[in-house]
Amino acid sequence: MSIDALDLFAASISRLRYPTLAAALAGPERPGAERAVSLLLGDIANARTPAESLAAMIHDGQFDAVEGILLELLESLGATPLGEDELARLMTDLDVTRAAAVADVGLAWATLEERAAALGLPREDGDEVLRLAGVSRPDAEERIAARTDQIGAELERRLQSDLGSATPGPDAESWHEAVRRSVDLGEFGMATDLLNSGAAAGVGGHSPITVPPMIWRWPWAGRPVAEVLEWYGDRVAPPDAEFGRYRPAPDDAEAQRLIVAVGAVVLRTDRDTVAELGAALAAAVGGRAAEAYPDGDGFAVTLDVTDPRLASLALFTDRLSLWAGATAPPPGNRPVVWFRPVMQEESPADPGLAVLDVSTLLRLIAPVHTARPVEPDTRRINLLRRLIPQLDPAALLASGVSFDGAAPARETLAWLIDAFGMVPEAAVLDGLLQDFGLHPAAHGRAVRSLIASGRSTESGRRITADDLRAVRTSTRAEIRAAVLAPLAANPLVRATLWLTLQHLAVESACAADDILDGFRQRNVPSRVAARMISRTAITEALETLTAQGLLRRRDRGYGSAAPGLVAALLDPAEMPAERRIDAVFEELSIEAQTADDAAAAVLGPRVAHLIGHRVDNDVLSVIARLQRIAAQVDNPPARTALTELEERIRALGGGTYVQLYYEALSPPEPVEVTGLVTRLIGSVEWHLPAGLNIEQPLGEACWVRINPTILLESLRNLVLNSARALARLDGTERRGIQIAVTTQPETADRPVPVTGPCVVIEVADSGLGFSAEELARARALTEPTGALWRPAAALDGARQGLPMSASLLWEYGGRLEVRNGSAIWSGGCVRAWLPQSTDHTRP
């Protein structure tokens, strides 16, 4: 590959398909021809679409390079290898990932400068490294690594000096280990506190990092339990020198009591021995025990071993069930701790079951680095460290991580992760709080994933910043679902959230009026706006989002929540921003319509009477006017016609419509269709234009089960639609309307989804039929997949007849079929398909 070819390739949009080669060409050291060919072949072997290549570059932190390519594509006049949705998704992903990178780098740099200041080193300006983070994350991380090495070297020199001059004491070994561990995990402030306080002050009160673990190895796994317990009682001849590390001090009364209680349960498991085991364990760890009770084929006792540092978390430690018996605990009682009277037992596969064996209890009470008794707090913490990692984090953290306790949030996270047997680096704790603020659900999902990550990696129990970076991306969908779950039933709050985040992408803060303008700019339907959107409603929505931890109050209104929450909410892989907003606005419209329908259902009877009252008044006024006109007419035939018209109008009094309302609410009953159609024809003849007749129904008697008023009025609507269509034609084309009633057996083909034997009522006319546009619209309104008629949407009567009739018949299992052409005419034809009734003889 020549240098000229490389130049052309570097300027070509095709380079997106070969990201490794493209990245090398864009770098400071341009590859030669041989190297370029090797990179090209590698890219061909691992082919990616342009969108996948750009997404990978974003993930790798090559922000400026991706931005240049996207701008190039946006300005391109020809075809591009990316669609509009892919471009929008990549632009959002770039913005979100770049913002997260700048936030991460800013936090890391600020932490480094705090350490530098503590050591007396000169501070370095972080503006340049933040600028680098927005351009290329790898370049910014190189600067951070260099600064870390510089500070680490100075810190190591200081620590070596301090450790060398410290006066050793009885706890010097534990103290040295705590200092070293704090430094190793990046907890430099803690290391400084330990050094300042000295070894004699102890280490237990600082953090889980400094609480010494119990001895994790049990050297005599093959020894019988009874023999090992005898060693504890033999103060003269222990088995070997190592046993001295495990033997509690003679004055450690709680430990001695627990040894005796374990021995009693091993010999005999009954209510008394299990009660004493629970009481002895609670005393040893500073907890409380209730009375024992029978449970299945064993006995259980409830313990409260809550650690004060975890008091605000909804773990099971305040109601820990300790069970002992011959077989496994009964199902359904989870989580539960199963005491096994054996020396060592593997954890079971049941995620709700933790095993507590004899060696664990003996290690729990063994001294650690000192001959003095272990503090109850330390024992309690180590007990939880043994039990909780055996259980499913998803079950224990189902309600998230609460920060309602008195302990600082960072300390709560540290103790929680430690309880699951993991050791977090300082950057992990700081990163969690920076990413997710104090949002319980987000922390619950993130911590669960971090624990799973720590269990599955070769790093053992340690959780690193790299683990957090991976979890931050992989859990976005889970965090988004958990965060939005409380808002599922409130589309107005969700719409406010999306509009607020959209506004905050360009402004530092927003107020209720800004969001109200956002609703107006999106042309919200007037009915939605009138019922749901106001400044008060928007303010309440913003307060709800703030209470949920998704927004923060600012001087000028509201600001964005933590960046990790924003990244999860705006994850472009889930849905482009505009489509997400459109979807929630559609929900708003549906909710507004549902609210209107519900109001209509409640007010229906009163509104029916109100309409009837108005019609009565209008009818009386029209009749009075007709009577005055008739009194002035000298022509007898005209006066007779006016009198007939007066009688017709008098029959339209409001009471007729009130009665119709209540009849339509009656339950269905057997209806003979042909007779009903005959009555229908007699009631609509006076509506017809001169010269237009309706032929008597064809067909024999057949039955359906339906409300007769609804069927009659639905058919009346169809007949009058045909009559008005024919009235617009010349007289020579008005041949008439025909109503046919037929039955269809169950095996007959049909164009509508109605099963079983059917009655088909066909209303056909001799007109010109439906145009193609009219036919498509009518079918969309009447077919089951179309929009059914909604009372709240019927602001006027135009074009409401067909969907109204379709929705009413649908309630009784029927469907409307709209078409052109019947058996005798080619005009418009509407058929009502209804299930045929076989029990028409019942009253």
Image: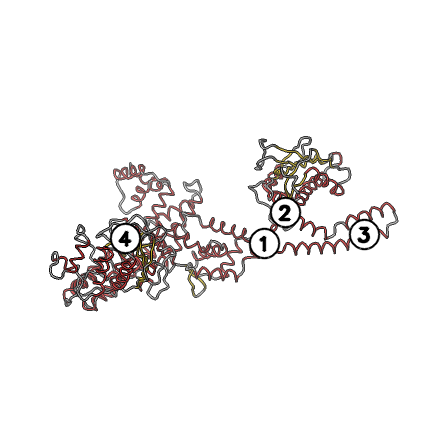
Secondary structure of the residue carrying numbered label 3: helix
Q: Position of residue 372 (x, y in %)?
A: 18, 65
Cα distance in 3D space between marks 4 and 1: 58 Å
Label 4 or label 1, whichever comes before in sequence order: 4
Label 2 crowd bin: few (<14), some (14–19), many (20+), radius 10 Å: few
Cα distance in 3D space between marks 2 and 1: 24 Å
Visible in this render: residue 201?
yes
Question: Which residue corresponds to the image point at 38% horizontal and 46% vertical from the top-left?
Answer: 69
- Residue that carries the numbered disc 3 in the rendered image: 626
Label 2 or label 3, whichever comes before in sequence order: 3
Q: Amino acid at mark 2?
A: Pro
Mark 4 vs mark 1: give the one in front.
Answer: 4
Q: Nearer the viewer, residue 682 or 331?
A: 331
Q: Nearer the viewer, residue 675 or 279?
A: 279
- Residue that carries the numbered disc 2 in the rendered image: 667
Contact between marks 4 and 1 (CB within 8 A): the answer is no
Label 3 crowd bin: few (<14), some (14–19), many (20+), radius 10 Å: some
Quadrant for the N terminus, please: top left
Q: Is residue 519 left or right of residue 219?
A: right
Per the rendering, the mark at residue 355 is 4
Cα distance in 3D space between marks 3 and 4: 95 Å
Q: Quadrant of residue 247?
A: bottom left
Per the rendering, the mark at residue 413 is none
Q: Amino acid at mark 1?
A: Asp
Cα distance in 3D space between marks 2 and 4: 62 Å
Q: Quadrant of residue 231?
A: bottom left
Secondary structure of the residue carrying numbered label 2: loop
Q: Position of residue 736 (x, y in %)?
A: 73, 35
Cα distance in 3D space between marks 1 and 3: 39 Å
- Residue that carries the numbered disc 1 in the rendered image: 596
Label 2 or label 1, whichever comes before in sequence order: 1
Q: Nearer the viewer, residue 640 or 227?
A: 227
